[in-house]
Image (cartoon, rainbow, N blue to C red):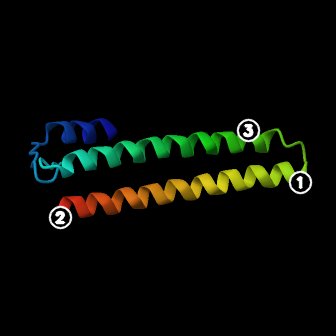
Amino acid sequence: MTASLLRLIADAPVKIDPRTVGVQITSGTGTFAGLLTTVYFWAGIICVVMIIFGGYLYTTANANAQRLQRAKDTILYASVGVVVIILAFTITQYILGRF
């Protein structure tokens, strides 16, 4: 069943419309969009690293209430950061795509 579905997808004609493939801006905003994308990428990497670090803190807390709370706060704040970054990226891509 899966092989036939994959074969059907592989044999389907593919048409790529350049208007729907990402945001392509050729003016000065292209540089701005590239800069924002880079900033969002690195901020996301930092958030993921902080989530991993929070997991490490949680694992090594040894039932110490203060360390457990610190680990939970680190994971929570980094997760909120990921959500904020995704929302900011979505909003800026929408705005830059409209102009």
Question: In the rendering, at what x and y percent does residue 6 appear?
Answer: 26, 38
The foreground one among 37 and 28 is 28
Q: Earlier in the sequence, mark 1 or mark 3?
A: 3
Looking at the rendered structure, the secondary structure element under dot 1 is helix
Question: In the rendering, at what x and y percent does residue 60 appear?
Answer: 82, 38
Question: In the rendering, at what x and y percent does residue 34 appear?
Answer: 28, 44
Q: Earlier in the sequence, mark 3 or mark 2?
A: 3
The foreground one among 39 and 89 is 39
| Three-letter code, disc 2 | Arg
Which quadrant of the figure has residue 88?
bottom left
Q: Which residue is mark 1?
A: 65
Looking at the rendered structure, the secondary structure element under dot 3 is helix
Q: Which residue is mark 3?
A: 56
Q: Is residue 18 above or below residue 99?
A: above
Q: Separation of disc 1 and disc 2 at Cα?
A: 50 Å
With 52 as the anchor, is 12 left or right in this view?
left
Q: Separation of disc 1 and disc 3 at Cα?
A: 15 Å
| Three-letter code, disc 3 | Tyr
User: Circle 3: is it few (<14), some (14-19), or many (20+) Cα within 10 Å?
Assistant: few
With 20 as the anchor, is 79 left or right in this view?
right
Q: Which residue is mark 2?
A: 98
Which quadrant of the figure has residue 54?
top right
User: Circle 1: is it few (<14), some (14-19), or many (20+) Cα within 10 Å?
Assistant: few
Looking at the rendered structure, the secondary structure element under dot 2 is helix
With 75 as the anchor, is 14 left or right in this view?
left
Number of the front mark, 3 or 2: 2
Question: In the rendering, at what x and y percent does residue 5 appear?
Answer: 26, 42
| Three-letter code, disc 1 | Ala
Q: Separation of disc 3 and disc 2 at Cα?
A: 43 Å
Q: Residue at x 82, y 51 (%)?
A: 68
